Image: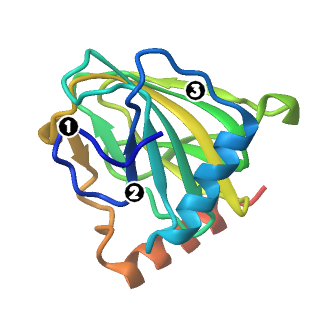
Amino acid sequence: MNRNNQQGINNPEVIFNTNKSLSLTRQNIEQLVRAAEKNSRNRIRFCVHQVEDEPLHQMFIVHPRHAYVRPHMHVEKSESILVLGGDLDYIIFDKCGNIKERLEMGAYNSGKHFYQRTGPGIIHTLLIHSEWLVFLEIIEGPFVKTGTKYAEWSPTETDHDSAADFVRSLKRKTTR
């Protein structure tokens, strides 16, 4: 794992793989969690792909309990997540912001759903319940910023108070 990359991305939350062949251990994932603890937003993304224009993006992602993942959709791409550790609700919305589906997710051995594939045009978010969520995200590359559309009815990530209120509201609506 290497924070230096050829893409010129200067983001302390992103690490790019520099090896043509790669295998990971539990200790590597624990290192990612420790790295996330040191970032201001407590997040980290380890990109297995080496360059941004690769046709397949595979990323090991760590989010803390308090992370707000703004509801969004991918315009033309499918996305899959595989939970390695932690508990969350994967929430799918209609275009007006009503919850259509709530999927309880956890690691494979939790007995909960551990894998989710979401097709293009489906608005979704993650509502994290555990101290840390660790998951593998797989999506078609290359990354194009305009390929992700955020739900207009959802608060921006920079509006911390509104985002926190939104998350609290979701938790009330999805109480297990």
Question: Of the residues under marks 1 and 3, which one precedes in the sequence?
Answer: 1
Give the amino acid at mark 1. Gln
Q: Is residue 136 visible?
A: yes
Q: Residue at x 52, y 67 (%)?
A: 42
Q: Position of residue 24 (x, y in %)?
A: 64, 29
Q: CA distance from mark 1 to mark 2?
A: 16 Å
The disc placed on residue 13 is: 2
Question: Of the residues under marks 1 and 2, which one precedes in the sequence?
Answer: 1
Q: Position of residue 129 (x, y in %)?
A: 70, 59
Q: Nearer the viewer, residue 2 or 167?
A: 2
1 to the left or right of 75? right
Classed neighbour count for the residue bearing mark 3: other residues with Cα under 10 Å, few (<14), some (14–19), many (≥20): some
Q: Position of residue 170 (x, y in %)?
A: 56, 63
Give the amino acid at mark 3. Gln
Q: CA distance from mark 2 to mark 3?
A: 24 Å
Q: CA distance from mark 1 to mark 3?
A: 31 Å
Q: Are marks 1 and 3 in contact (CB under 8 Å)?
A: no
Residue of label 1: 6
Closer to the observer: label 2 or label 3?
2
**Vertical relation: 92 (above or below) 130:** above
Q: Nearer the viewer, residue 65 or 124?
A: 65
